Image (tube, coloured by chain):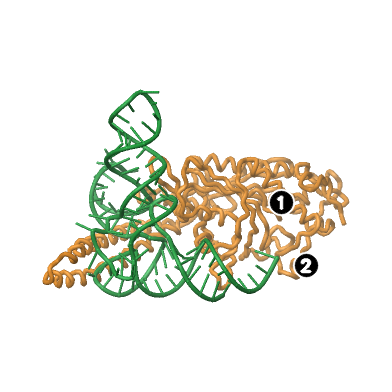
Chain colours: A orange, B green
Amino acid sequence: MIDPRILRDEPDRVRAAQAKRGLSADVVDRALAADTARRTAILAFEAKRGEQKSLGALIPKASPEEKQDLLARTKTLAAEVKEAEAARGAAEDEWTEILKSIPNLADEATPPGGEDDFVVLEHVGTPRDFAAEGFEPRDHIELGQILGAIDLERGAKVSGSRFYFLTGVGAQLELALVNMAMDQARGAGFTQVIAPSLVRPRAMEGTGFLGQAADDVYRIEGEDLYLVGTSEVPMAAYHSDEILDEATLPKRYAAFSPCFRKEAGSHGKDTKGIIRVHWFDKVEMFVYTTLEESYAEHERLLAWEKEFLDKLELAYRVIDVAAGDLGLSAIRKFDCEAWIPTQGKYRELTSTSNCTEFQARRLDIRSRAEGGTRPAATLNGTLTAITRTIVAILETHQLPDGSVRVPEALRPYLGGLDVLEPV
RNA sequence: GGAGGCGUCGCCUAGUCCGGUCUAUGGCGCCCGCCUGCUAAGCGGGUUUGGGGCUACAACCCCAUCGAGGGUUCAAAUCCCUCCGCCUCCGCCA
């Protein structure tokens, strides 16, 4: 939810933000009208309610005759109060609903436009030249099979398409990556968390995943519970309805959880392998801080993501995602995309978003300082999404015989193993 | 899954049976002031959150807020219903 005061005082800023995302600005006028209607309704209700209260206070000490008269008056008044209260409630609901549908205002620096209008910020490392090395790289599917690391056939047999088993060194690789990510995070002062991956509607809604993204969310039948697509969801809701002392900020969490995505509408895309799956595990950084600090924190999250990719010796680029592709909550988003040799392109491995106060307003997360309370700012960033990280490692560090060199930083987490050998 | 108990403004707590100055009690903590070589003690005052009005987004005034949402009533912390959470016991279970 955006700041209602910005909407009221600077509607043009909101209109411009809508345009930057390629969305209609009609919603701004509807929101303004709803705000006026809401305040009128509040005034009407409070006047009635005040009258009811003052009359009601007279009743206990009134004489019998006066009492009859008062009761008659308050009786009709009670009905009016009820009516005014209902009208106020309806007006407030209408207003919140419209307000909630407005996406966060993209940062000034965010490139305008849609999915393809991203700006490349930098390239790190050089994609490996397999032609120069004189062999054709195998894709991660083949490598996974050779190494006994990924079992796609049985994944499909047991769970369906876009499922897999990680076996042998594949399973070891996941645990190693998780531990390496957690160690890095702990070293940087993060609190490690294992988060629940089933959440109530409030958490899902509050993080902005029940709007246009609802199609991608799994719901448990008859349970009013959702499977999260990222631990951003439980971690944002973690401090919901709380007031955090600003002296305790930033609060940094590194959360491990499985992630579930329906991948509705992506039929035909990445149908093979484990690039796009219905379930994967992830270590996610999540930070609560102040609005002013959020911008610098966003850069820090990006730096920690890069540090992790650097340790895995991957070639990647960092993009500044365009406004239309930000999702509901973010004002700015950086994606780190690793080079996938057999695809000949960069694919998203990690992503970090600054959601400013947007999620905090919805989830009622405030901070307290000298001047009073205000909404906190939330940010998130991937440390490692296991499946795509494995794809990048296998393909990037493969050797002609189908074995895979283990990046040095990862070796301690694999018991010193320096090469994954075919089984 | 079954049975029972509980949820009050940071923490603890009175009030709930028997609805009405509850405009929510008291203590602790915290903040301001007085007193004071310093500190402590003592004394006085303040201390939920959200919204609205008016405005300098101050002060002030108003409305809501006793886990959440409904209901009964002229009137609900108090009575009724539903939900959520916590605790105890039984059953089951990794």
Q: Which mark is residue A389?
A: 1
For residue A400, say whether it is visible: yes
Which quadrant holds residue B19? bottom left
- Name the spot of residue A214 as percent of width and height, x first: 54, 64
Image quadrant in which the C terminus of chain A is located: bottom right
Q: Disc number at residue A309?
A: none
Classify residue A305 as left or right of residue A11: right
Identify which amino acid the numbered label 2 is placed on: Arg
Callout 1 crowding tier (Cα within 10 Å): few <14, some 14–19, many ≥20: many
Report if residue A332 is visible in the image.
no
Secondary element under disc 1, as helix, strand or loop, is helix
Secondary structure state at the residue bearing disc 2:
helix
Vertical placement of residue A403 versus A311, above or below = below
Of callouts 1 and 2, which one flags the residue occurring earlier in the amino acid sequence?
A: 2
In the rendering, at what x and y percent does residue B3 appear? 51, 75
Percent of width and height locating residue A338: 70, 48
Q: Nearer the viewer, residue A63 or A227?
A: A63
Residue neighbourhood size for the residue with mark 2, other residues' Cα within 10 Å, grouped as few (<14), some (14–19), many (≥20): some
